[in-house]
Amino acid sequence: MSQFPIYRPRRLRANENLRRLVRETALCTDDLIYPMFVVHGVDAAHEIPSMPGCFQYSVDRLVRAARTLVDLGIRGTILFGIPQYKDASGSGAYAEDGIIQQAVRAVKDAVPDLLVMTDVCLCEYTDHGHCGVVHEAEVLNDATLSLLAKAALSHARAGADVIAPSDMMDGRIGAIREALDENGYEQIPIMAYAAKYASAFYGPFREAAESAPQFGDRRSYQMDPSNSDEALREVGLDLDEGADILMVKPALSYLDVISRVKESFQVPIAAYNVSGEYAMIKAAAHNGWIDERQVALEVLTSIKRAGADIILTYFAKSVVEWLEG
Ligand code: PBG
């Protein structure tokens, strides 16, 4: 390439028309999935203190919120349920009339155009707050698989469009794929939380979903933030077991992982811009220290630039307004 003064990179930055013409990455509404939380009750919308602008909705209010998403042009939501009762095996996760199953039925009935994804995990439903069955302080892998498969199947029966396992047990994608296929749901895609790290950025979510572990932490099943070769192995396993979309989570501190996964596997990649990433921007903006719109768009654009095709973000509704405004 020729050098200065022949080549002057600033020439193509001179005005907005030129900048737009050569722009490599454009965030768009089609990329976004908006996560929502559902609780028992009627006409309830409890704002989550550490996630301003996000709510725990009762099913009726969730349906209204789902309509708003479609009106904005957002294609999909991912739903998290908060049950009334928790127990050791997380039975609320696979109860035919559990909170998430009710929510999926109601949303698909009233707003069929919205893609409904469901998070498959036990942590919101277990009294100990872990993502699997616990025996003597150990989170058991194989004993958890059949429960996850049951949960996934109950979501499919309720009408879920995409199943998203977030538990990080080994072999769960295969177990879920098999259960779905055996029951005639071979057309339902699996979006695997494939490289999911044991991250401190999930703090606000655990408040929102009331799912903090009651002892210990998730480091025996979620990944060590120091590792990225391991992410490729994890992702490869999930793909072999039948995952259709691979997710990296969190997003912002793992842009290198998103990029490596995208280069290694030519399948759709999702990235989860998690609760702590949202809360940091909200808090700093609230203090007047940063510009919320500009920082959020910069972060989300960087996630897409790194290689994400799909971004799960609590900013989704704001992004649509910002992109249009
Ligand atoms: C459930 C689950 C978590 C998140 C998504 N699914 C929490 C966790 O693993 O503790 C986090 C999402 C967020 O922080 O926004 N296992």
Image (tube, grey):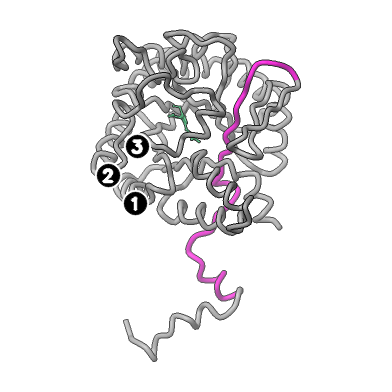
Q: Position of residue 50 (x, y in %)?
A: 58, 37
Q: Which residue is mark 2?
A: 228
Mark 3 or 1 closer to N-term?
A: 3
Image quadrant occupied by the C terminus? bottom right
Furthest toward the front, the residue is 287
- On screen, residue 283 versus residue 140, left or right, reads right
Determine contact: label 2, label 1, CB under 8 Å.
yes
Determine contact: label 3, label 1, CB under 8 Å.
no
Element marked by disc 2: loop
Task: Check the image and report above or below for 276 versus 297.
Answer: above
Q: Residues within 10 Å of mark 2 (few under 14, many from 20)?
A: some
From mark 3 to mark 1, how far is it between C-alphas? 12 Å
Give the extent of the magenta segment: 17-42
Which image quadrant is residue 35 in? Answer: top right
Q: Given the image, on which type of amino acid does mark 1 rest?
A: Asp
Residue drawn at the location 45% of the way across and 20% of the way down? 123
From mark 2 to mark 1, how far is it between C-alphas? 8 Å
Element marked by disc 3: strand
Q: Which residue is mark 1?
A: 256
Q: Position of residue 236 (x, y in %)?
A: 28, 36
Image quadrant occupied by the N terminus? bottom left
Q: Which residue is mark 3?
A: 195
Q: Position of residue 209 (x, y in %)?
A: 54, 25
